[in-house]
Amino acid sequence: MKRCIILLLAVLAIMPMWAQKANNDPYYGRRATLFELLPVGKKDIIFIGNSLTDGCEFNELLGNKNVKNRGIVGDIIQGIYERIDPVLKGQPKKIFIQSGVNDVSHGVSADSIARVMEKLIVKIKKESPRTKIYLQSMLPFNNEVREWKLLKGRDQVVVDGNRLLEQVARRQGVTWINLYPLFVDENGRLKAEYTNDGLHLMGPAYLVWRDAVAPYVK
């Protein structure tokens, strides 16, 4: 019996890690396998992240045919780490990373978000050393527009996470782009006019994002 209890405790200890790595969503699978096949070249500029990136046509907004979207709805930072090899194989010119809010919704701490992001950046630098890396902050959300139960009371994790992500950027010598102040209202929430569900972005919000990254894309 004692041995069974020890085994059960060991399983429970690693369950959060499983939860962070597993993504069996059909859309995620379709998107990920497509990205494994699509070519990436040395002139390309890659935007990679979760649904916030997936939901934008950055190449059209930026007027740059070399901009390619590699965002997937529901992705976490560890998910990006595990699927980024096809991107790095092409040795792209630049990579813009924006991720973390899904990690927050999974109960991941700000410290853990920063650690896995640093691991991702180290991987990119090692496998594609000429690629310029741009780390973008997490965005706020707004549970007054719509309640996201898994994000309830987690606003401060985004704030703390961004502070630590900025430290990661400095430590790794990559460019930090702080989007958060452009999207937050006076109450620390995503501006209501930028969203229709409290988390995802409307068209005008993507124009703000475009203007923030355009100088770095060029």
Image (tube, grey):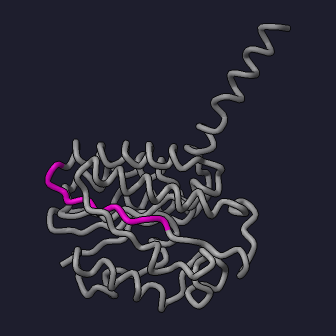
Question: Horizontal and vertical percent for residue 169?
Answer: 31, 54
Q: Residue at x 50, y 80 (%)?
A: 183
Which span of residues is magenta-colored?
129-138
Depth check: give the residue in front, 217 or 42: 217
Q: Is residue 132 above or below residue 207?
A: above
Q: Is residue 38 above or below residue 172?
A: below
Depth check: give the residue in front, 70 or 135: 135
Quadrant of residue 145 within the rendered picture: bottom right
Question: Horizontal and vertical percent for residue 98?
Answer: 42, 64
Depth check: give the residue in front, 164 or 149: 164
- Side of 70 relative to 66 (left or right): right
- Side of 206 relative to 152 (left or right): left
Depth check: give the residue in front, 62 or 190: 190
Q: Residue at x 64, y 52 (%)?
A: 106
Quadrant of residue 196 within the rendered picture: bottom right
Q: Residue at x 18, y 79 (%)?
A: 218
- Side of 195 relative to 56 (left or right): right
Question: Horizontal and vertical percent for residue 117?
Answer: 41, 49
Say whether residue 70 is magenta.
Answer: no
